[in-house]
Amino acid sequence: MRKIIVLVSLALSFSAAHALTPQQERMGACNKAATGKAGQERKDFMKSCLSDGRVAQQQKMKTCNVEAAGKKGDDRKAFMSECLKK
């Protein structure tokens, strides 16, 4: 019985350890898209590809902040949550 418990917990720890973060997923996607590129061209492409998500999120935050200008407290919090999910 102890062996089964140990094996199950070991298996669960391995699956949790191998879950990719969003940054790792983006890196993988950018690497696949960059096949065939080399040198400075690849560097420029990777820089652009990896920064796209951050720029979009920052822009979304700015837009939502402008739209939420008159709201306060829980109303603002709920609005921002919904706005950023779009």
Image (cartoon, grey):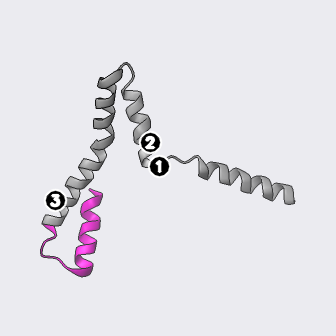
Q: CA distance from mark 2 to mark 1?
A: 6 Å
- Residue 12, horizontal then vertical, whole percent: 67, 53
Residue 3 belongs to magenta span: no
Q: Amino acid at mark 3?
A: Thr
The residue singled out by tag 2 in the image is: 25
The local secondary structure at tag 2 comes to: helix
Residue 74 belongs to magenta span: yes
Which residues, given as a range, are shown in magenta?
67-86
The residue singled out by tag 3 in the image is: 63
Q: CA distance from mark 3 to mark 2?
A: 26 Å
In this view, 39 is above or below 57:
above
Q: Which mark is residue 21?
A: 1
Q: Amino acid at mark 1?
A: Thr
Q: Residues within 10 Å of mark 2 (few under 14, many from 20)?
A: few
Q: Say left or right for 15 vs 72.
A: right
In this view, 8 is above or below 73:
above
Say if mark 3 contacts mark 2, CB within 8 Å: no
